[in-house]
Amino acid sequence: MLGFIVRRLLIALPTLFLITLMVFSLQLLLPGDPALALAGEERDPAVIEAIREQYHLNDPIPVQYAHWLIAALHGDLGISLRNREPVTSLIVDKLPVTLELAILAMLIALVIGIAAGLVSAIKKGSRWDFGANVVALSGISVPNFWLGIMLILLISVRWGWLPASGYTSPLDSLAQNLEMMIMPAVVLGTAIAGVMMRHTRSAMISAIHADYVRTARAKGLSERVVMLKHALRNALVPVVTMGTLQFGELLSGAVLTEQVFTIPGFGKLIVDAVFNRDYAVVQGVVLFTGTVYILMNLLADLLYYLLNPRLRA
Amino acid sequence: MSRLATIPVSETGAKASPDQHCVLRVDDLSLGFRADTEVLSILDGVSFELNAGRTLCLVGESGCGKSVTSLSIMGLLADNAEILGGSIRLDGRELLGLERRSLERLRGDAMAMVFQEPMTSLNPAFTIGDQMIEAIRCHRDLNADKARQHAVEMLIRARIPAAEERLNEYPHQLSGGMRQRVMIAMALANDPQLLIADEPTTALDVTIQAQILELIRRLQCDTGTAVLMITHDLGVVAETGDDVAVMYAGRIIEKASVVELFDDPQHPYTIGLLSSIPRLDGNLERLPVIPGAVPTPNEMPSGCRFSTRCPFADERCLEQVPPLGEVAGSETHAVACWKAPLEHQLAYQEVGA
Ligand SMILES: Nc1ncnc2c1ncn2[C@@H]1O[C@H](COP(=O)(O)OP(=O)(O)OP(=O)(O)O)[C@@H](O)[C@H]1O
Ligand code: SF4
Ligand SMILES: [Mg+2]
């Protein structure tokens, strides 16, 4: 068990290293002198030189990288050019918003995706199966921003049932917060639900034909127990793994969806940063989400391992 | 054993005295599988009966319908199967057409089954204990502790070493032979009247095979369970059977006591099978003695289904189905062949020599 985690961590480290390299080289590739950008209105050569010194811009690139990496490891991702705030605190501010959105979307995806996959596998070839497949395929192929705009037009603009955009912290008002989060969560969740449904369906179909399911029936267990315990338990292994990876993707910010609903999460943070050439923020967010993504991969492996007694021997 | 004290007698009826009590009666069972437009006939008029405490071997080549027969008794046929006629009675009770709930009550209780593939028949995600206790509590009103005790007892009776510890192990931690012992222990946990063993040893090493057969026989002696032993191996028949039914292409073509069958086989197919058993003198070259292949379901001959391979086939064989008729001088021996009793037996054996 411990050996497995250590092995996986050792594999994750080089990937992480590559990400830091790429994120760091971002600032080298950007046109323009970063010292000038940092100086803002200031044009005094002495000040600019001071900035160069302060940010190690005169050092050789590997040394710059080392400085940057050490700072990053200490949680210092630099200062946002735009609002002079530490990037880390910007990320910490936005994290709860994106996290909440990701969790809501994931719940929706799990409930709809697994239930629909289960029904369509058990009733394979029926109208239920057909319907679920059509809905799943649309869920997968309809672009999120389009679905988001349609929902806004219908539910907010025409019927006025839910606010079109904005954000209230759940600490201020949970009800208001949910009113604003539910549409973007549905948009993100249904897209993933489609993928989940397809995975659950195919895993269930092969589980249903497994010998151990026949054994379970031969024991006299009810069809419900046979399906929900014996077949689903095995079918869920790949589904859980896939869900974890999807969650990692959600955490890296649903850029378009957040933009459509003007939700102040990672997606918005990174879009604003790109438009403002606020490269420290871009670097910080990419580094952070990249790390989260690797951790989610690690978690997915771990879950797969835990759900698979055969691997635990 | 204190087992009977902890286990209430099955509501389907008290265990009657062995020998005479008929546990399973299959009557004129016909069945097919739906394919595109038609229904392909697989079983045609299969009949046999099995008494308490006895072992009936159902023997025949791969694809002749042995598994389909056993699955139709258990009510575990695939969705595309269609019963075309006949009757299956367990302890006098008709199983065909029984609603699902009633069938579930019988499965794993009055009748149980052990499958051919021990490696894949247990759920890899649950411990042996989980799976056994589940089987017990599904039919018995026992608390978890009592059920666990009973599971351990069954594992001990199935000669599984370190039974207590096994309960916490997963199937992959056990060898194939051990898994089959677990399957047998689980099948017998609720003291069924009928145990169906569908080629229980085919997937196992030869040495393990003998042990598993011995185990089934010994447990049968203890409990008086009727065993339907399905096999393609006449060695298994000789080892375990009281009676034997030989199946060919979905029909029973000969029925007899094991002694009668080995002493005086009547059907050309049976004779061919028997002469294809390797002799103790190790003359293995005589193995494939029946030339030709089993007809596929969509090109079944309309008369005797063996006519495509039978050296004695004539006009009548091709057109008319030979009925399963008693062999003169024996109430237990029956054969479905127009030419029986066969005088040419010796000549036929020459073919393989
Ligand atoms: N679900 C199904 N749909 C269509 N045909 C089937 C189905 N199940 C079995 N069959 C056919 O029924 C016939 C009998 O199969 P069965 O499994 O009973 O053979 P068997 O005697 O048990 O052979 P083996 O020794 O290989 O286990 C075969 O021709 C098989 O192809
Ligand atoms: S009935 Fe005819 S074809 Fe069939 S086994 Fe007998 S002799 Fe052969
Ligand atoms: Mg079979």
Image (cartoon, coloured by chain):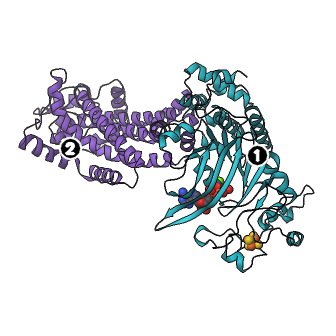
Chain colours: A purple, B cyan
Residue at mark 1: B205
- Ligand 2's image quarter is bottom right
Residue B294: % across, % down:
68, 68
Q: Which of B71 and B251 is in front in this view?
A: B251
The answer, for residue B40, to whether it is visible in the render is yes
Q: Nearer the viewer, residue B287 or A290?
A: B287
Quarter in which the N terminus of chain B is drawn: top right
Q: What element carries label 2?
A: helix
- When asked about the image quadrant of residue A3, the answer is top right
Contact (Cβ within 8 Å) of mark 2 with mark 1: no
Outermost bottom residue: B315
Quarter in which the C terminus of chain B is drawn: bottom right
Residue B28: % across, % down:
62, 58
Q: In this view, does B47 lie to the left or right of A168?
A: right
Q: Which chain carries label 2?
A: A
Q: In this view, does B259 lie to the left or right of B304?
A: right
Q: Which amino acid does label 1 sit on?
A: Asp
Residue positioned 9% across, 40% down in the render: A156
Q: Residues within 10 Å of mark 2 (few under 14, many from 20)?
A: some
- Rendered position, B162 above or below B310: above
Marker disc for residue A256: 2
Q: What residue type is labelled 2?
A: Leu
Q: In this view, does B182 lie to the left or right of B214?
A: left
Q: Mark 1 lies on which chain?
A: B
Residue A52: % across, % down:
24, 32
Residue positioned 24% across, 52% down in the render: A142
Q: How crowded is mark 1: few (under 14 residues within 10 Å), some or many (20 or more)?
A: few
Residue positioned 68% across, 59% down in the render: B62
Q: How far apart are marks 2 and 1 (CA)?
A: 61 Å
- Rendered position, B91 above or below B28: above
